[in-house]
Image (tube, rainbow, N blue to C red):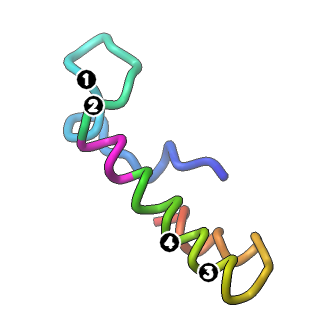
């Protein structure tokens, strides 16, 4: 899973020149991972996570 494309540079990262996610970025990734796990629980196929992670 590569969630980087789903993050917004201005809204989801710490101030300029910082490569770390801020609280909003962590929340967004947490929701994506939670959705992925819920789908996995239904399908037992991590391939379904592509729809969750790719915007």
Q: CA distance from mark 1 to mark 4?
A: 24 Å
| Disc number placed over residue 39 in the picture, else none | 3
The numbered mark, 2 or 3, whose residue comes first in the sequence reads 2
Q: Position of residue 24 (x, y in %)?
A: 24, 43
> Disc 4 and disc 2: Cα gap in Å?
20 Å
Horizontal side of 12 relative to 48 (left or right) equals left
**Magenta span covers which residues?**
24-28
Residue 25 painted magenta: yes
Comparing 27 with 20, the one in front is 27
Q: Quadrant of residue 15?
A: top left
**Is disc 3 placed on a helix, strand or loop?**
helix
The reply to whether callout 2 and callout 3 are in contact (CB within 8 Å) is: no
- Dot 2: what SS? loop
Q: Residues within 10 Å of mark 3 (few under 14, many from 20)?
A: some
First along the sequence among labels 3 and 1: 1
The residue at which mark 2 appears reads as: 22
For marks 1 and 4, give the one nearer the viewer. Answer: 4
Report the side of 21 relative to 4 (left or right): left
**SS for dot 1:** loop
Label 1 and label 2: CA atoms lie apart by: 5 Å
Q: Where does the image place residue 39, in percent across and percent down from the top left? A: 61, 80
Q: Are marks 3 and 4 in contact (CB under 8 Å)?
A: yes
* Distance from the alpha carbon under mark 3 to that under mark 4: 6 Å
At mark 4, the secondary structure is helix
Give the labeled residue for mark 4: 35
Q: Nearer the viewer, residue 9 or 42?
A: 42
Q: Position of residue 1 (x, y in %)?
A: 66, 52
C-beta proximity under 8 Å, tags 1 and 4: no
Q: Which residue is mark 1?
A: 14
Rate crowding at label 1 as few (under 14), some (14 to 19) or many (20 or more) other CA atoms within 10 Å: some
């Amino acid at each position: 899973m590569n969630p980087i494309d789903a993050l917004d540079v201005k809204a989801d990262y710490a101030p300029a020149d910082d490569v770390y996610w801020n609280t909003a970025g962590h929340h967004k990734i947490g929701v994506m991972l939670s959705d992925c796990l819920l789908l996995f629980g239904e399908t037992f196929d991590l391939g379904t996570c592509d729809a969750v992670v790719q915007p």
